[in-house]
Image (cartoon, rainbow, N blue to C red):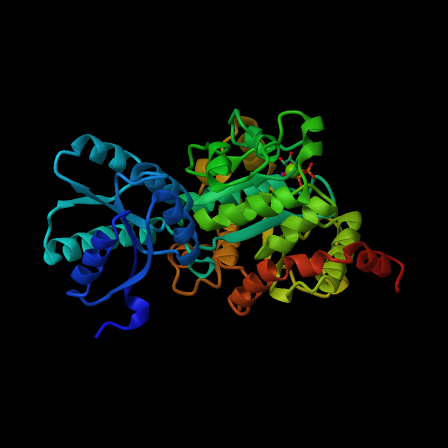
Amino acid sequence: MVMSEQRIKILIVDDVAETRENLRKLLSFGHGFIVAGEAENGKEAIALAKRIRPDVVLMDINMPVMGGIEATEAISVELPTTTVIIISVQGESEYLREAMAAGARDYLIKPFSADDLINTIRRAYEMDAKRRARFAPVPIAQRKTGKIVAVFSTKGGVGKTTIATNLAAELASHARKSVVLVDLDLQFGDVAIMLDSVPIRTIADIAKEDEIDSELVEACLLTHKSGVRVLASPLRPEQAEIITAKHVEAILTLLAETYDFIIVDMPQGLNDITLAALDAADKILLVTTLELPAIKNARLCLEIMEALGYDQDKVKLVLNRSSRDIGLSIEEMEKTLRRSVDVHIPSDGRVVVPSVNKGVPFVASVPSARISQTIRDLARVVAAGDADDAAAAALAGGAAGVAGGLAGGVAAGAAEGRDGSTRRRMGISARIFSIFTGG
Ligand SMILES: Nc1ncnc2c1ncn2[C@@H]1O[C@H](COP(=O)(O)OP(=O)(O)OP(=O)(O)O)[C@@H](O)[C@H]1O
Ligand SMILES: [Mg+2]
């Protein structure tokens, strides 16, 4: 016996009481149906259908007050999960075409047997159920969640864009991952020029729309030769004004549903926009150099991130232009920052400058250079946590020098990053203020 909740709920619509009664009887020959209501005309049918939400409506065509075609159209529009089956007599073929165009799924021509009726209802209902399942929104839990990686610093010119572009190219080419690079340096972004690309649409074209969906975001991306997709910053600095933290949050969330890695090139400094991206990030690559102002700001930044509740493992320290012969020692810096450098990137103007000027990532043009190898180290750090992931495996052959034990806690950090974003941003100015004032 079919359980009552699995029964197909039916609404019978016909102006002749005898016909309605006959339909009821025919339906009693098959299990799994329940006649949930009867209506005498189209108008009544629409009102009743809205109330009882039947799975299937058996609809006569010619009825007083409102005919079956008009009612079918209204029900198809207002109750898209309800299947309408038209019941007609011989010679109404013109009406049938109209009824199908109005949204009916099938029809039965009188006289018909109980088997005809039952089979038609089941077939139409199952077909619609399959369509519904196919086009139903994917539940949140099943949504793909790519890793959002923010390349950040509290000091300008330390190499964020250089690192972000090369990291994106490395992940796309060697790890064969889908990668999107987002230029959040909204006023003076350099990503497009560093990748020798001319954007037609930018993040500003997304922000000016009332509603943001993945089609819109996708339409604003360009594709670089390396396979990296790029969301460029606005073409003019004044266009940056229309972009809000909410836009940034929405864009990153949508991209994370489609791409494996979302690399975000950030401007320096903390504000609503950068905080939205840092909150959304699974990993923050905090870039510093061996210069006193950069170290002082990195220390402040680490303190703020701790106060914001970011997991220790969410933040990775990247020392750019790392060198032992420029006065300041790396050990001193690590002591000051109370943490060790996760990835060292050497200074190599002979590789970096031509790469920037030609708009070709050095990981592609000079893959054997030491600096390119260290970008591979960085890619491993970013891919860590995907223990059995192809990205981590593909990158495992990279040069040594990455701090060990990087995988632990990454997944937890990732979940924290997205779930707690709204909570964490509340009262953020007060918390930052208290850190600066030692409160
Ligand atoms: N490891 C490196 N070796 C040599 N030169 C480098 C290195 N990293 C960056 N540079 C150079 O430093 C300059 C600044 O780099 P980049 O634009 O990537 O910094 P940024 O942090 O993005 O700057 P901004 O804060 O303006 O966005 C560039 O001219 C780049 O060529
Ligand atoms: Mg930059």
> Viewed as shown, does residue 18 lie left or right of 276?
left
Q: Is residue 200 above or below residue 73?
A: above
Q: Is residue 29 left or right of residue 396?
A: left
Q: Residue at x 78, y 52 (%)?
A: 297
Q: Nearer the viewer, residue 271 or 391?
A: 271
Locate residue 225, reporting x and y percent.
42, 32
In which quadrant is the N terminus drawn? bottom left
Name the spot of residue 392 as percent of width and height, x first.
Answer: 42, 58
Rendering coords of residue 93 (x, y %): 16, 33
Q: Which quadrant is home to the C terminus?
A: bottom right
Q: Image point 55% across, 67% down: which residue?
A: 412
Question: Which image quadrant shows ligand 2?
Answer: top right
**Residue 56 in the image, given as x and y percentages of width and height:** 29, 53
- All told, the count of numbered labels is 0
Q: In the image, is 131 to the left or to the right of 275?
A: left
**Residue 279 visible here:** yes
- What residue do we see at 66% from left, 57% from top? 422
- Could you say which is closer to the camera, residue 251 or residue 92? 92
Is 122 left or right of 63, judged from the image as shown? left
Q: Residue at (77%, 56%) from the top-left corner?
A: 428
Is residue 47 or residue 170 the one in the foreground?
Answer: 47
Give the residue furthest to the bottom. 1
In this view, 292 is above or below 331:
above
- Residue 396 visible in the current orientation: no
